[in-house]
Image (cartoon, rainbow, N blue to C red):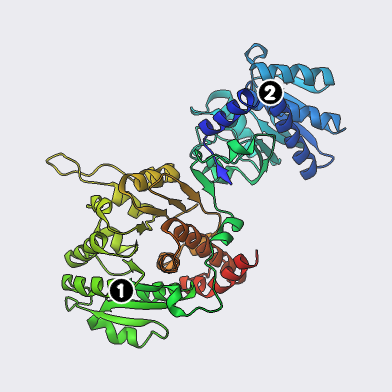
Amino acid sequence: MKVVTAAEMREIDRATIRTYGIPGLVLMESAGMAVAAKAMELFPEKRFLILCGGGNNGGDGLVAARGIHNSGSRAKAIILSKQDSLSPDCKAQYQLAQKTGVDIEFRKTVSKSDLHGSVIIDAVLGTGLSKPVGGDLAKIFRLINEADVPVIAVDIASGISSDNGEVLGEAVMADHTVTFGLPKRGHFLYPGAGYTGSLQVADIGFPEKLTGSEKIKAELVSRDIAATLVPPRRRNSFKGDYGHVLVIAGSRGKTGAALMTAEASLRAGSGLVTLGVPETLLDIYQSRVMEEMTLPLADRGDGTLAAKAIDAILNFASQNADVIAIGPGIGVTPDTEEIVKKIVLSSAVPVVIDADGLNAVKDSTGIFSKAKSPVIITPHPGEMARLLRQKSVEKTDKKTGISIQDIEKDRIETAISFAKKTGVYVVLKGVPTIVATPGGSAYINTTGNPGMATGGSGDVLTGIIASLAGQGLDSAAAAVLGVHLHGLAGDTAAAVLGEHSLIASDIISALPEAFLSLCQS
């Protein structure tokens, strides 16, 4: 399902009315009645207070009030606007609701007694908000949030940016949201996601040609979409058909990162996995691996890779590997920086970069555009901020002021912008994880839980994505399916173990069940 910005939704609305000839009042009628139906389904025999603004969101609310009233339930509408300030469609709905007998008042404020014992339907602002909420509206929103009453938001909770989920001044905390046509980005991006509650997307008659348009670049990754990406397994196949992953990872004190990346690759379906590790640590790895193979590489004598390992890595990859995963636990030294950069520039197979591999290129992201093969990067917000914090042209060599908070203000646009600029596939980890492509598309993941915020979880994700790329999926599909599977395995593990005790190896152990659930869906 596509996910839209406010501007994209306005264009769908405009084209529906002008190109397809469906009147705006007809769309408003369908929207309001969808809200009324959901409200009465959730809260039968309750009293409803519908708070309306003066725009079209308020018009939706007045339709809902009329639908609830006509069903025999109690509904009262308070319009938080002057009567002469109503939009044309809102005014038409006000007049119709009034004739139908709906109890309607025009007010600037509401009181605790208004809210007491009612289900609140928030139809105040909707998706068009572009400036912070203040004054009387802010007080009303705080009063609603402090009251112990259920709240249903119309389209999006008032005060939430539909584009990036930002709380603009003050916002209504909804228990349920009924949105129309397509979900909005602000329903999934925090903090707005936390104000949405359960989300229902109501079909109100927008043409599929508009809601499915390729011009809409963001898409929600559902279970059904993920299931279509799972690579098939032929009966007459052998291990060479399912890819050979070369994992370049680990250093003294961080051997576990390499082992988890490799094991995750195997559990995600790889036919072969080779661990390229510092030669002074080879005995440690040899005592731990079972199905994986090892490739001893030159190191500096301290358990970190030496630059002279580059030729061995590239030679092995060109002759044996289908993908390289590099970065987990390798450390950041001048040698590892040289290794990562050379692999990006020279590898004949796709490269997945995580962790210390990203830190190695944080000041030289321009090399991504010179890569011979596709590159997938998997930064968390801190690593993304470092990748964006490029050297300035000033003599003081200051860095541009990019922070984690800047990243989190708009995860989707951050990922899209970097992918388009550099030509890499970006997996911006977090809640939700975003996959962005060089072509400007973005995919919003729907799986995962807080228990996955644990050391090694990212190493597991790197292994899964590399495995899928090695099995022949293109970079976008490998990243999208990899992220979904990673979160689904985490959810599967958390259902048994709980979130507090979840560790990264539990995610690996749950991968088989995650695959089964997708293959059987």
Foreground: disc 1 or disc 2: 2
Count of numbered tags: 2
Tell me, for residue 356, which label it has, or none: none
> Is residue 328 found left or right of 509 in the rendered image?
left
Is residue 501 positioned above or below 448 on the image? Answer: below
Q: Percent from the top left, x then y, of residue 168?
A: 50, 33
User: Who comes first in sequence, dot 1 or dot 2?
Assistant: 2
| Pick the front one: 372 or 174 | 372
Q: Residue drawn at (55%, 54%), measured in percent from left and top?
A: 446
| Pick the front one: 295 or 390 | 295
Q: Give the farthest residue toward the top.
A: 84
Task: Give amino acid for label 1.
Answer: Gly
Q: Residue drawn at (77%, 33%), measured in percent from left and top?
A: 48
Q: Percent from the top left, x then y, of residue 512?
A: 56, 74
Note whether residue 189 is visible: no
Image quarter where the C terminus lies is bottom right
Q: Give the farthest residue toward the right.
A: 72
Residue highlighted by disc 2: 23
Is residue 137 positioned above or below 408 on the image? Answer: above
> Is residue 171 found left or right of 355 in the rendered image?
right
Task: Give amino acid for label 2.
Answer: Pro
> Does dot 2 land on a helix, a strand or a loop?
loop
> Does dot 1 land on a helix, a strand or a loop?
loop
Residue highlighted by disc 1: 250
Q: Residue drawn at (57%, 67%), measured in percent from left and top?
A: 494
| Pick the front one: 131 or 282 | 282
Q: Percent from the top left, x then y, of residue 97?
A: 78, 21
Q: Percent from the top left, x then y, of residue 1?
A: 59, 47
